[in-house]
Image (cartoon, rainbow, N blue to C red):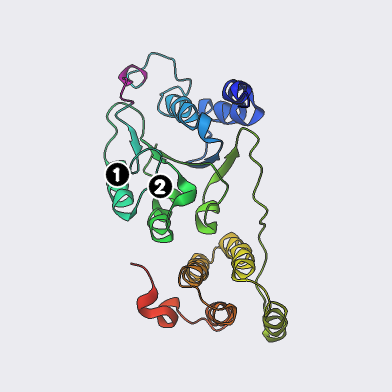
Amino acid sequence: MPDISPLLNGWSASAEWLDISRMIAGNGAPQALAAVMPAEIALDFRDRFARLALCFSGTGSDGCASCLSWTHDGHPDMITAGKWGAPPGIADCLDFQWQMSLKPVAAPGRLGVIPSAEGLSLPAANSLLKITEEPPAGSRVLFIAERDEFIPTIRSRVWMLRLGGVTEAAISPKAPPGNGMEWALWLEGTRKSSLDDIALEAGAWVLDLCARGEWKLAASCENAVHLAKKRHFSVSMAQDALFAIISEGVNDGKIFGDLREA
């Protein structure tokens, strides 16, 4: 068995962790953070991050009322969506949002933790978009994942942090075809592609649409890809759906009808 002690003990000395720690102490840390790391360090990271984020001075050890509120069960203002170690479902996410809206018990704000975030279903992830973009005043949202597999509309709203040797996912924003000729070339060029290839390229389009503030179109595109993979669409069906949504402005509800998940 490999020795993982350097991993367990060394991540807190990394430049990435030291940077985010200084940002919290300086009251400049992002409101929404997505942290990707090996499972072995996830709990330690959550607790260390929470102690800083819930402390009035951002140091985690100033003896403030919030720091004194920690018990062996955690902190009253650290809210977890669902259960640790499993991605939350829609009901868990709705309860999480309600708890996050409540007044903090002891801290300057609340910290919402979404574990196993790479496993979020699309409906569950979509239900978290608003609170991720606009958490309650003084509060923060923390996504924790083992793999950098966030859906693009979540990724576009968070500050990414990678620890323990995790590298950035190989996907960058890319503009979708912009005119009839570009679409014709894309449709012909991807005719023999796999559905996974289509999904990967569409994910890059979603990132580009998010960067341009076209949130509704990005979400429709993401829904199309999700349903195409879940319902085992043919490549031509996925192509047609993406063309209709992006180029023709057709609402995804009109295309998929009852196939869409609530």
Q: Which residues are magenta?
A: 67-74
Residue placed at 40% from the left, 78% from the top? 253
Is mark 1 in CB contact (under 8 Å) with mark 2?
no
Q: Which residue is mark 1?
A: 101
Q: SS at mark 2?
A: loop
Q: Is residue 254 above or below residue 165?
A: below
| Residue 208 vertical placement versus 116 (above, below) | below
Q: Tell me which amino acid carries mark 2.
A: Pro
| Residue 141 painted magenta | no
Residue 77, quarter of the rendered image: top left
Question: What residue sits right under mark 2 in the picture?
Answer: 87
Q: Nearer the viewer, residue 201 or 244?
A: 201
Q: Identify the secondary structure beneath mark 1.
A: helix
Residue at 51% in and 58% down: 153
Task: Give coordinates of residue 175: x percent, y percent.
Answer: 66, 68
Quadrant in which the C terminus appears: bottom left
Q: On the picture, is 49 further left or further right than 71?
A: right
Magenta stretch: dominant secondary structure: loop
| Residue plotted at (67% across, 76% down) | 177
How crowded pointer 2 is (Cα within 10 Å; few <14, some 14-19, many 20+) is rated as many
Residue at 31% across, 45% down: 96
The image quadrant that residue 6 belongs to is top right
Q: Is residue 235 above or below residue 122?
A: below
Image coordinates of residue 248 in percent, x first then y, are 55, 84
Of the numbered discs 1 and 2, the one sitting upstream in the chain is 2
Q: Quadrant of residue 103?
A: top left
